[in-house]
Image (tube, helix red, strand yellow):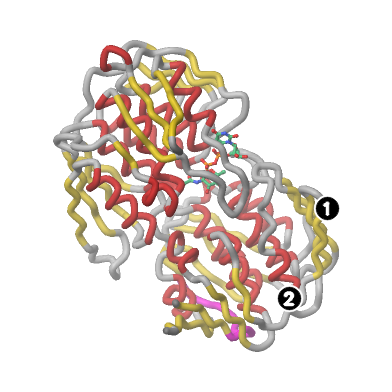
Amino acid sequence: MDSIIVRGGNRLSGTIQISGAKNAVLTLMPCALLTDEALTLENLPRLADVDGFMHLLNQHGASTMLRGAGNGGYGRVMTIQAEKITSTVAPYDFVRKMRASVLVLGPLVARAGEAKVSMPGGCAIGNRPVDLHLKALEALGARIELSSGYVEAYAPDGGLTGGTISFPLVSVGATENALMAAVLAKGETIIENAAREPEIVDLCNCLVAMGAEIEDIGSDRLVVHGKDRLHGATYRVMPDRIEAGSYACAAAIAGGELFLSGARADDMHPTIAGLREAGIEIDERDDGIGVATNGAIRPVTISTAPFPGFPTDMQAQFMSMLALAEGTSVLTETIFENRYMHVPELSRMGADVEVRGRTAVVKGVKELTGANVMATDLRASMSLVLAGLAAKGETKVLRVYHLDRGYERLEEKLSAVGADIERVSEG
Ligand code: UD1
């Protein structure tokens, strides 16, 4: 199993190319199930989850063709064609490894009239139910049954019918499933209290490129006019705002100046506001974002919230940065109930963090020290790599497969800007 070894203390300087967004790709790939024509996705990141989703689509009968890219190997292109859906089952083995597999549910029921998808179950950051996904499909006329750990959904008379979906709380995944189902439902669908994350906008834009009709894209009330069929399209995946935010924290922690090429500031204002409050200089440019530190990190108080609030996917990385702030920061996690799994590991590196319920009080320390650490989810693993960049001595981050799910060639990108970081394989 691979580990990442970081020797802290190097300043960072240079350009990091930001990859296509993981969370966008994982909702754009299932769109291919909505049409018998080819969907070509550009700017695809090289990630374990993308490979996993590709195999899931193959298993539903879609053909996939993956091409490398000229841009230093970044930004691959994948053409997916689901001429026929040969299986409407998403087996446990796929879903258990990758929660986002549940995003085939909406497209399969909408196109094939049925789907049988394994329930994702709990995960490292909490319980994460899918009840809202199911309620959305029910509002479009689907019948849902739960049996033997699977969700079985049927569209009576073979098709879904438009309706009003009113979410009691904001869910990114449930909004995505609702949208992908509604575009092929008969008549009009209204989605109230929809998630407004930039990845939802990316999904809407891709669906529109495929012939869907969606009003008020980017708002919390989406109106979808269903179509009999969608057609193929070529669509470029948006840049990864969480990857960009993570590297901005790297510059803040290690010190130095980075240019995050391709990062889109418009998608990142909550993160940028947090960084600026912490004293990090951010230069918003058309072609990317410049990040520079001018000394000390200031403490901040931040609560996670659905977009346009501060992203829960940036909470762990901010905590590593604030562990070195001059004063006490307060972080509150409002989205997931169990998203402080990185705290004990950061504490082992010398951070002073006290968790009280959903709030973490982070008292800045002068120095962190390297240790062997591991995390149970993707962003928590990144927070440990970031802490390692500043820590005295060597930090060994175990269970690197979490990082490989969401950060394209992490060690290459960081070592190219001066970090002392390498991947080692053991056994
Ligand atoms: C997505 C992102 C994840 C991010 C999260 C919140 C992907 C692949 N993942 O996850 O990186 O951290 O948004 O921005 O895009 N909930 C329910 N019932 C449901 C669905 C959700 O109660 O049916 C709850 C969840 O437990 C959580 C909250 O709603 O407390 C928000 O979750 P949601 O927005 O659905 O997250 P995901 O789509 O799973």
**Are discs 1 and 2 less than 8 Å apart at CB?**
no
| Residue sitting nearer the eye, 11 or 39 | 39
Disc on res. 314: none
Q: Is residue 332 left or right of residue 91?
A: right
Q: Amino acid at mark 2?
A: Arg
Q: Amino acid at mark 1?
A: Arg
Residue situated furthest front in the rendering: 148
Q: Is residue 18 left or right of residue 73?
A: right
Give the alpha-carbon distance from disc 1 to disc 2, as whole Å: 18 Å
Q: Position of residue 55 (x, y in %)?
A: 27, 52
Residue 104's quadrant in the figure?
top left
Q: Quadrant of the C terminus?
A: bottom left
Q: Position of residue 86 (x, y in %)?
A: 18, 37
State ligand 1's quadrant: top right
Please tell me how crowded label 2 is: few (under 14), some (14-19), or many (20+) other residues with Cα within 10 Å: some
The magenta segment: 7-15
Disc on res. 356: 1
Q: Position of residue 318 (x, y in %)?
A: 67, 60
Residue at the image point whose x is 49% and y is 32% from the top: 174
Q: Position of residue 186 (x, y in %)?
A: 31, 13
| Residue sitting nearer the eye, 135 or 228 | 135
Residue at the image point whose x is 60% and y is 62% from the top: 380
Is 264 placed above or below 403 here? above
| SS at badge 2 | helix
Counting the numbered discs, the total is 2
Residue at the image point whose x is 31% and y is 44% from the top: 29
Ligand 1 within 8 Å, label 2 CB? no
Q: Is residue 80 left or right of residue 180?
A: left
Q: Which residue is tagged 2?
A: 348
Q: Is residue 311 left or right of residue 37?
A: right
